[in-house]
Image (cartoon, grey):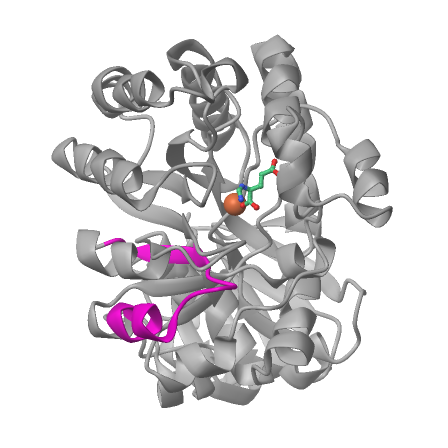
Amino acid sequence: MASSLLIKNASQVVTMAGKTEKPARQNAMQQLNVIENGSVLVVDGKIKGVGKLEELKQRYKDDSAAAEVVDATGKTVTPGLIDPHTHLVHAGTRENEYAMRLKGQSYMEIMNAGGGIHATTRATREAGFDQLHEESKQRLDTFFQYGVTTVEAKSGYGLSLEHELKQLEVAAKLNEDHAMDIVSTFMGAHAVPVDEKENPEPFVSRVIEEMIPEVARRKLADFNDVFCERGVFTPDQSRRILEAGKAHGLVPKIHADEIEPYGGAELAAEVGAISADHLLKASEEGIGKMAGNNVIGVLLPGTAFFLMAEYANARKMIDSGVPVALSTDANPGSSPTLSLQFIMNLGCLKMGMTPEEVLSATTINAAHAINRADTIGSLEVGKQADIAIFDVPNYLMLSYNYGMNHIDGVVKRGQFVVA
Ligand code: NIG
Ligand code: FE
């Protein structure tokens, strides 16, 4: 007997329909395709129908009669939120550096003195597989609590073949034994190891010749990311690393123009990256090139908030035709949060995005940013039944009450994981 679930009479069902083929840009980011007083029928983990209750009952008599029924009166139903940029797998916290930054030290000063990414790299190298698995599992549980049903997860706190593989293997194991879907990105080029700072080329060669081929051979990642920033990897090194990934089937992503304008947005367009992320300091030319080359801008306003920096110019990007997605950038140094709902608030209040745009950016465009829009990101017939139910009567309220968790229930592949 097929297992079915009927979520009925939600005051709004935000479907995001019609954006599966291409990421939503400009006006399309404003179109949510909302059904007032709507219902969703799920059969065997997939969306069977979305519409008015009576229509669904008539059209799918048997399935709706057999379904477990959940009354969503007064609630808002959306696709499960998608977080397309996280540093999920890591050990430890860095609240000491937070205190140092509050006294005036900068993020890059702390990193250049051997802290920052290097501090988490030491902790992650020391941690065994089981500790990393346990810490990351707890983060996934929290992501569910806040309505996120798929996360991208980067390596990059290993900085050696052994420890990069360990991080990616933890992500692969969690993808198997946790209900969350995890999409992996190799980010061996997250920092140059401290003892090689003066002469980074041998490390770049190891990323290209040793790590990328092995990660690809073991099919441990879909994407290859690099921190292209002054003092980390130059645009030339970043280009070589991203091209090497492409040669092994890894799709480029890039941490671009976070601290300084550095040509990262331009490079993303030139190498055909699926996304360029951060972009706080992206140049006008870079934004134009991204728009012309279908590069999704993954914006991370939690990082600007936490580093007390200027926000990315989301308005300019959207108005220029860049498809924009939003993400937590969850990591212990620059964005220690697991709340994509708070990121939605910041998108509106600090980056001038509309409530409609932030919802597009955390559902369908986030799905496009991890190349999963064929199965997730909207409530459309045939897609995976990943659904967030919020205890608010309309979607505007999601980015109105800030710093709060509005989740009432979360469905993953047709099963309640938060109820
Ligand atoms: O996306 N910018 C580089 N990497 C991360 C931060 C990592 C860390 O500080 O541990 C980011 O902000
Ligand atoms: Fe990041």
Residue in the image at 71% along x and 64% along y: 342
Which stretch appears magenta?
273-290
Instruction: Give residue 113's quadrant in the image.
Output: top right
Q: Is residue 75 visible?
A: no
Instruction: Give residue 68's quadrant in the image.
Output: bottom right
Q: Is residue 61 above or below residue 338?
A: below
Q: Is residue 208 above or below residue 281?
A: above
Q: Is residue 18 visible?
A: yes
Residue in the image at 66% along x and 23% along y: 119
Q: Position of residue 363 (x, y in %)?
A: 47, 66
Q: Position of residue 51 (x, y in %)?
A: 46, 83
Q: Nearer the viewer, residue 113 or 206?
A: 113
Q: Is residue 140 left or right of residue 377?
A: right
Given the current orientation, which residue lies at the most extreme left position? Answer: 247
| Residue 289 shown in magenta | yes
Residue in the image at 45% along x and 66% along y: 325
Q: Is residue 257 above or below residue 38?
A: above
Residue in the image at 72% along x and 59% along y: 308
